């Protein structure tokens, strides 16, 4: 299928979920630069679905995605796309007002439980005594990105679509009503519609295509894993986050993982953890919990890519016919992917709009050009 209806650049969760949804209506081909899918951001995340991320729009996209995770469409997956994990947002006394404000913002999306110090420590005994206040969403989901990627790939293929790995788009040209993409290895593909789901590289892909970049900013985030104190009941622990963007931690494969919630500006690269943020993760863990991080078991980093207003860009480019943006998912690209795929499908096929709480205008990539004009 060298001449599909739609070409997608990027085999992360954004590209694959949109491709899977669109494959019900069109012939779709996905080009992924790496040898495997999800090699960059989609394979390096904290894998949570929770509402303490981003603004109202991100929360609305997450809320709209939630039913897909709770009850995936028939035949989509043989395994769960995630498992329930409580989410605890905790605060010291000096952070109480911030917690109150967050509770007000989150309460229309999740059934929250307000916790006093006792409730906080019952849910998460690892926190220090100064964690006096909390809000808990007992209905969070620890997502399984591998299951998500594989299920989307399977749906793409069962709809007659294709994935090409090791297929880095090296040139992108418009002519005769088609986007022609030539890969580094010399493969050529053409389609009237091109979806740019290249994550941290999405502005680079736009430049290749002669479309104006959005000003995307990839930001590095670091995660470490380490042993929990002996006797910790890991299966009962929540995903625990400070009310400010300082630290989160959660159980992970028999250990704990933690992030200092760093946002270090980066070029689009294969992100690697730096010593400073690794040490910061351990330091903040010891500052807010009773855990001693004696030995770091593993560490990794990934890029969270933001538009200038930190809201995703989904829609046709105003300056390049048939060039569709699906970028800027920031720190919520897994948990918002079902809604984003549904929105991309509505905008591309003209089918009915399923995400009532979000408008096309809010996501329109053209908003950045109007601001600059
Ligand atoms: C540490 C960390 C924690 C996170 N925690 C969460 C979380 O708890 N919940 C959540 O929902 N999200 C989380 N995220 C965010 C989430 O991982 C991202 O929003 C999401 O993975 C972005 O998906 P993507 O498909 O746009 O990007 P990617 O997965 O990076 O995919 C883009 C793909 O495009 C390919 N590509 C680039 N250029 C080309 C080219 N020229 N030709 C062909 N292919 C190309 C790349 O190789 C890459 O595979 C986290 C991210 C990080 C780093």
Image: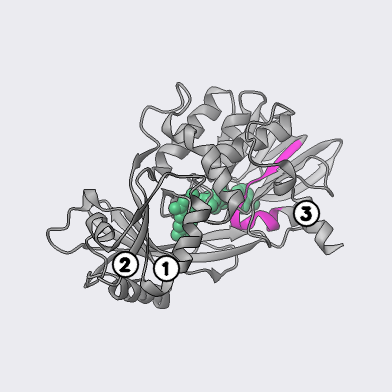
Mark nearer the viewer, 3 or 2: 2
- Label annotation for residue 236: none
The residue closer to the viewer here, 332 or 52, is 52
**x%, y% of residue 65?**
52, 38
Q: Which residue is mark 3?
A: 367
* 3 and 1 marks in contact (CB < 8 Å): no
What residue is shown at x 50% (from left), y 33% (from top)?
153
Q: Which residue is mark 2?
A: 132
What residue is shown at x 39% (from left), y 76% (from top)?
275
Above or below residue 4? Residue 246 is: below
Q: Secondary structure at mark 1?
A: helix
Above or below residue 225? Residue 151 is: above
| Colouring of the image | one colour
Q: Quadrant of the N terminus?
A: top right
Determine if residue 204 is in view: yes
Q: Quadrant of the C terminus?
A: bottom right
* 2 and 1 marks in contact (CB < 8 Å): yes
Determine if residue 273 is in view: no
The residue closer to the viewer here, 104 or 197, is 104
Q: Residues within 10 Å of mark 3 (few under 14, many from 20)?
A: some
Apparent side of residue 286 relative to residue 328 in the rendered image (left or right): left
Q: Find out whether residue 194 is within the magenta segment.
A: yes
3D distance between C-alphas at marks 2 and 1: 9 Å
Apparent side of residue 365 relative to residue 89 in the rendered image (left or right): right
What residue is shown at x 39% (from left), y 67% (from top)?
247
Of callouts 2 and 1, which one flags the residue occurring earlier in the amino acid sequence? Answer: 1
**x%, y% of residue 319?**
84, 49
What residue is shown at x 49% (from left), y 64% (from top)?
271
3D distance between C-alphas at marks 3 and 2: 42 Å
Q: Which residue is mark 1?
A: 96
Magenta range is 193-205
**x%, y% of residue 28?**
64, 31
């Amino acid at each position: 299928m060298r001449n599909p209806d739609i070409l997608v650049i990027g085999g992360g969760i954004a590209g694959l979920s949109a491709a899977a949804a669109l494959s019900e209506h069109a012939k779709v081909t996905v080009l992924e630069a790496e040898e495997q899918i999800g090699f960059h951001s989609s394979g390096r995340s904290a894998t949570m679905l929770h509402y303490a991320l981003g603004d109202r729009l991100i929360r609305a996209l997450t809320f709209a995605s939630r039913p897909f995770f709770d009850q995936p469409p028939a035949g989509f997956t043989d395994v769960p796309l995630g498992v329930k994990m409580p989410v605890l947002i905790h605060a010291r006394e000096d952070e109480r007002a911030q917690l109150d404000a967050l509770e007000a913002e989150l309460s229309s999306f999740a059934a929250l439980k307000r916790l006093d110090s006792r409730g906080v420590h019952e849910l998460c005994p690892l926190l220090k005594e100064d964690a006096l206040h909390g809000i808990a969403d007992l209905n969070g989901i620890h997502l399984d990105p591998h299951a998500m990627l594989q299920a989307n790939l399977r749906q793409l293929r069962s709809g007659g679509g294709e994935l090409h790995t090791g297929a880095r788009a090296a040139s992108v040209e418009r002519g005769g009503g088609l986007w022609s993409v030539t890969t580094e290895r010399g493969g050529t593909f053409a389609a009237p519609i091109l979806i740019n789901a290249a994550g941290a590289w999405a502005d680079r892909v736009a430049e290749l295509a002669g479309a104006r970049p959005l000003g995307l900013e990839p930001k590095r985030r670091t995660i470490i894993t380490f042993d929990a104190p002996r006797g910790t009941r890991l299966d009962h622990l929540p995903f625990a986050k400070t009310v400010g963007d300082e630290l989160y931690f959660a159980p992970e494969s028999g250990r704990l993982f933690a992030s200092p919630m760093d946002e270090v500006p980066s070029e689009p690269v294969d992100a690697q953890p730096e010593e400073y943020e690794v040490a910061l993760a351990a330091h903040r863990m010891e500052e807010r919990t009773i855990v001693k991080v004696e030995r770091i078991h593993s560490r990794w980093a990934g890029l969270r890519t933001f538009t200038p207003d930190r809201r995703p860009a989904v829609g046709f480019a105003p300056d390049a016919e048939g060039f569709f943006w699906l970028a800027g998912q920031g720190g919520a690209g897994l948990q918002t992917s079902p809604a984003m795929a549904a929105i991309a499908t509505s905008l591309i096929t003209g089918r009915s709009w399923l995400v009532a709480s979000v408008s096309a205008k809010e996501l329109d990539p053209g908003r950045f050009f109007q601001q600059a004009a």
